[in-house]
Image (cartoon, rainbow, N blue to C red):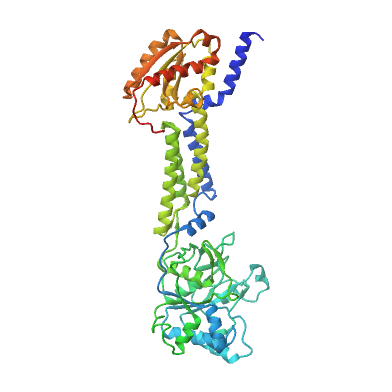
Amino acid sequence: MSVENRDEHTSFLFQLKWLIPSLCFRSISYFYWLLAFVMSVVAIVLTINHTKVGGIDSRTFDTVMKMRWETPSPSQDIVLLDIDEKSLAQMSQEYGRFPWKREVFAEVLAELEYEQAQSIIFSIMITDPDKGDPKSDAVLSYIASESFVTVYPLVRLDPQSDVDSKLKVCDLIPAGDAPCDTDATVAAILPGLPGMRHDMGMLNHHPDIDGVVRKWELEWQEEGWKFPTMAGAALTVAGVEPKVASDKPFVLNWRGDEKPYQRISFSDYMAYLNGEEGYIPPGFFTGKHVIIGASADGLTVFKNTSVGMKSDGELLATALDDAINGTNLKPMPPWMVTVLTILFMWGMAYMFVYGRSQGRLDKVFVIMQSGAVVIMALTVNYTTYFLDLAPLFKFAFYFFVIGRIHHSMGDKVFMGDVDYLTGVANKNDLDSVGVIVFKRDSKHFLLRRREMLQLQEDFPGAEIFFCHNSFETGKLLEGSNKVEGIIVMGNHETQEARMDRLLEFLKQQELHNVLTGVYAFPEAVMQNKALAAEFMAQKTLYHVSQLPLGGNEEDE
């Protein structure tokens, strides 16, 4: 292979190797805008197709809920009357093992209504009569039928069993509600006592697809009919207008373990009814919403929630509290999340185009991401709004990674990678180098890529690089101070004029202590252009050593 053919072959390999970095460097003016546009279109299309870009991301929501340091205070008007382990132990001597005689519950319901409780949610499911004590059943059924503030549980069975059921949907719809004109049947378990078959509420709930309870509703809705849930029925009998939409699920705003709802052991209340003092102050239940439930092992099935396992009583208390006081979490609308995501990406595109260094870009990106996290945390801790910015984080991360790779590839050309400098020097018409170095001061100067592209266009036939630690990276000046300046390779006949114009440009940037020099490549370099990078490094180091000491050495 002749020398000419070998040079052409080497030149072709060089161009092939540096094709992508060169394209990355020269596409600075439009690449990031194009990337922002494409990713914005993707975000919009996903939002239109109801793909989860905005709204609530379950994993993000659960993590944030568990990490909250501030939660809403529970309403003092909601009380849990709890059949706990203590109740089972203390009441076993007088009433025996659970289930107790039904007259126990009759006494409690009668006393609570006498104390003018605002509503009573009786969440204990009684499905079968007590054949051993029918009189006790009769007492409870009568007391229940005479209560106008108590709601009783109804359990919805698998809809596939509806065809085998004899219970008609219209038989469930409370009198006075919307007319029922369907002959459809429904599979459900009604309370076992006739006196409880009024003011019923659906005990079921709708967990998310992963089995976690995050939302609640005041109406159980199915095709062609709807029925109040226990919380919805309680508000109805109490005459309370909810502050949430009755026909839509709402996101539960969990109270923290350090702020539990008022809980009174069932045994303590029975002791109070038996005249024992010191348990409950007189009139305590007046105006209260009382939830009668069980938390003892074996009497309830704890439900998985965003903050851990919760009993039915705790779920109902949280739902009732949120519905009465409007403390439910309000998610940011999907369109708003999409708008913020798009603005975030276009902001990063601006930084990539007009930014001066990768270090600064990294810092700004971290600050923006951290700021979004802080805003998200503050709102969920101190307001009833949940700003799920997880989509923003994801899109911003993808944008940053792609942009950072593009930026790093372009830096190999922009910053004058040693291998790239050596390859450029192989061009036959380049026989000299101009060196410009300057002191790092409080007005630390970094060329923008767009400015470098403009300089390249202004000086055709020359190769211009911004030297920012390039030789140190290439191990040619390892251990030296930071090297910053401009290196110009060109033809010696036009080099002086080119350097003068560059100096005029630098004066406009208010740079001080600028040192320059123009050097023709010695014969050894002209014969072996692989020595060009080391030659330029030596000349650059010489000029750096002549700069006055001092200045800000902060790494950008």
Q: Is residue 55 visible?
A: yes
Rendered view: 427 above or below 126: above
> How many numbered badges does the structure rendering display?
0
Residue 516: x and y in percent read 38, 16
Residue that sits furthest to the right in the current view: 164
Left or right: 243 with respect to 421?
left
Task: Name the quadrant of the C terminus.
Answer: top left
Q: Which residue is found at the position 60% from the left and 13% from the top?
A: 8
Q: Which residue is found at the position 42% from the left and 25% from the top?
A: 483
Q: Which residue is found at the position 53% from the left and 44% from the top?
A: 45
Q: Is residue 26 visible?
A: no
Residue that sits furthest to the bottom in the current view: 135
Q: Nearer the viewer, residue 173 or 242?
A: 242
Rendered view: 92 above or below 73: below
Residue 128: x and y in percent read 62, 83
Q: Nearer the viewer, residue 411 or 339?
A: 411
Q: Nearer the viewer, residue 430 or 319?
A: 430
Left or right: 15 with respect to 285?
right
Left or right: 482 with respect to 214?
left
Residue 123: x and y in percent read 53, 76
Task: Name the quadrant of the N terminus.
Answer: top right
Q: Nearer the viewer, residue 316 or 305?
A: 305
Residue 296: x and y in percent read 56, 76
